């Protein structure tokens, strides 16, 4: 969920990035990449 950040929050699923809507929950899947500012994080399953 993006809480109204100035630069937005983006999620890459496959090859496409989409910008999250402010204050709306978004489900993530394994291997999605979250980008906020110059930082990114990949969603992985822990064993």
Image (cartoon, rainbow, N blue to C red):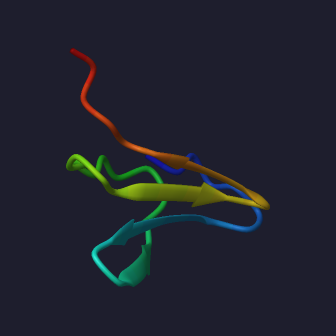
* Pick the front one: 10 or 30: 30
Residue 5 image position (x, y, % from top left):
69, 55
Residue at the far top in the pictured view: 47
Residue 34 image position (x, y, % from top left):
49, 55
Residue 46 image position (x, y, % from top left):
27, 20
Figure quadrant of the C terminus: top left
Left or right: residue 33 versus residue 28 is: right
* Pick the front one: 24 or 27: 27
- The residue shown at (32%, 37%) is 44
Residue at the far bottom in the pictured view: 16
- The residue shown at (43%, 46%) is 1
* Pick the front one: 26 or 15: 15
Left or right: residue 15 versus residue 27 is: right
Residue 23 image position (x, y, % from top left):
44, 50
Q: Is residue 37 above or below residue 25?
A: below
Q: Is residue 43 above or below residue 17?
A: above
Image quadrant in which you'd find residue 15: bottom left
Residue at the far front in the pictured view: 47
- Counting the numbered discs, the total is 0
- The residue shown at (57%, 46%) is 3
Left or right: residue 2 versus residue 16 is: right
Q: Is residue 45 above or below residue 39?
A: above
Left or right: residue 12 versus residue 46 is: right
- The residue shown at (43%, 79%) is 17
């Amino acid at each position: 969920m993006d809480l109204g950040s100035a630069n937005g929050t983006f999620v890459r699923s496959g090859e496409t990035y989409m910008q999250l809507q402010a204050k709306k929950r978004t489900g993530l899947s394994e291997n999605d990449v979250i980008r906020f500012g110059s930082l990114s994080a990949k969603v992985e399953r822990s064993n």
